[in-house]
Image (spheres, grey):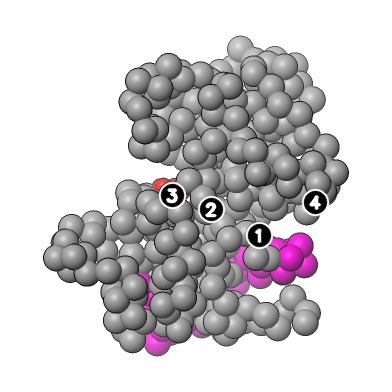
């Protein structure tokens, strides 16, 4: 089956569910969306179900749907819904399935998106499930890399920060392994990339290395993908205190970097990137966040069958 025929009604749960050809097709549709906005989703309704805080994912999905002529319903606080009366996720999805045409859900439990997708007959898009996956972030990250570097294949890309709990880097690592990128993982010992992801890279023969300091690799890379230390996922707050300032990127380490270096971050940032870096010419995190609109428009249009 070709990439173009496989998106109608498809759930977007994990980036691992997509082939390289399918990913490239989504990025191509996102480029079209950037250039040509039409109200192709008129009459369609999106539900945004957010059990965890979000600024970018929820608002960019809502904006993407609105700009394409669709409508949005949903909640950003499950306490004001019947979940507070004990309703199960399964039952709620069975009901919401009859109200809307597509669902975006963020939930703290790993695997919750897959479960919800089983309950739903309509497409369900994972807006982040615990420390597991954030596939739409990965697609906008790939779109951003392509846009800023002119290509993805063969780039040298470093990920720094919380590689253990950061779901964005888990999804992104898998995706970049399809594009023959050289990967550098920079983290404190306690926040290293999970073993199962390292195993996947080893099995595929992907070139990668692990480091303690950004300064060890900053001068050889094309993209630095910084991440927030995920305070909310630490079982023991004392462990967070030990690593909360593990990395602070500032202009002092940018003196000898490649001209094309772009610094990305899924945001929100807390301590990881000094605000002075914003004007360095290497900062690209705000453009990255804005790329959420065309990429999420592409996904909505594809799963709703308005574009092939
Ligand atoms: N990058 C990202 O997922 O941001 P939000 O948590 O604000 O949605």
Q: Is residue 199 magenta?
A: no
Residue 46 vs residue 132: left or right?
Answer: left
Q: Is residue 239 above or below residue 303?
A: above
The first of marks 3 and 1 along the sequence is: 1
Depth check, mark 2 against mark 4: the one in front is 2
Which of the 4 image quarters holds residue 44? bottom left
> Is residue 263 shown to the viewer in this render?
no
Mark 1, Cα crowd under 10 Å, few <14 / some 14-19 / many 20+, is: some
The stretch in magenta equals 19-47
Reading the image, the residue beneath label 2 is 133
Q: Residue 46: within the magenta?
A: yes
- Identify the image quadrant of residue 61: bottom left
Give above or below for 174 relative to 70.
above
Circle 3 residue: 130
Q: Residue at x 59, y 17 (%)?
A: 251
**Percent x, y of residue 65:** 43, 71
Whether pointer 1 and pointer 2 mark residues with C-beta atoms closer than 8 Å, the reply is yes
Check disc 1 and report its element: helix, strand or loop: helix
- Point 18% across, 65% down: residue: 86
* Residue carrying label 1: 16
Residue topped by disc 4: 179
Mark 2, Cα crowd under 10 Å, few <14 / some 14-19 / many 20+, is: many
Residue at 70% of width from left, 83% of height from top?
A: 5
Q: Where does residue 204 sit, x and y in percent of width and height?
A: 82, 48
Q: Between marks 1 and 2, how big is the CA–CA gap?
A: 9 Å
Gap in Å between the C-alphas at discs 2 and 4? 19 Å
Mark sitting earlier along the chain (1/2) = 1
User: Of residues 280 and 92, which is closer to you in this image?
Assistant: 92
Instruction: Please report whichever mark, 2 or 4, sits nearer to the chain's N-terminal start.
Output: 2
- Residue at position x 53%, y 24% from top? 190
């Amino acid at each position: 089956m070709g990439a173009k025929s496989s998106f109608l009604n498809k759930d977007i749960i994990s980036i691992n569910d997509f082939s390289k050809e399918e990913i490239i097709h989504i990025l191509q549709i996102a480029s079209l969306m950037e250039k040509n906005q039409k109200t192709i989703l008129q009459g369609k309704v999106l539900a945004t179900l957010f059990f965890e805080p979000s600024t970018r994912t929820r608002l960019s999905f809502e904006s993407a749907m609105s700009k394409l002529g669709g409508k949005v319903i949903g909640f950003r606080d499950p306490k004001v819904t019947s979940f507070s009366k004990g309703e199960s996720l399964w039952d709620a999805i069975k009901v919401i399935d009859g109200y809307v045409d597509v669902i975006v859900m963020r939930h703290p439990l790993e695997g919750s998106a897959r479960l919800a997708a089983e309950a739903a007959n309509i497409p369900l898009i994972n807006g982040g499930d615990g420390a597991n996956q954030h596939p739409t972030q990965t697609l906008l990250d790939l779109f951003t890399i392509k846009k800023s570097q002119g290509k993805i294949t063969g780039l040298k890309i470093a990920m720094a920060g919380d590689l253990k709990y950061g779901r964005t880097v888990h999804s992104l690592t898998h995706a970049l392994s399809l594009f023959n990128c050289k990967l550098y993982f920079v983290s404190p010992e306690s926040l290293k990339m999970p073993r199962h992801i390292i195993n996947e890279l080893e099995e595929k023969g992907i070139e990668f290395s692990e480091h303690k300091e950004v300064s060890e690799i900053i001068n050889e890379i094309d993209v630095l993908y910084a991440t927030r230390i995920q305070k909310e996922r630490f079982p023991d707050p004392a462990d967070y205190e030990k690593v909360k300032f593990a990395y602070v990127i500032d202009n002092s380490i940018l003196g000898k970097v490649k001209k094309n270096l772009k610094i990305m971050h899924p945001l929100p940032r807390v301590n990881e990137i000094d605000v002075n870096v914003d004007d360095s010419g290497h900062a690209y995190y705000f453009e990255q966040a804005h790329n959420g609109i065309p990429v999420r428009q592409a996904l909505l249009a594809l799963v709703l069958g308005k574009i092939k």
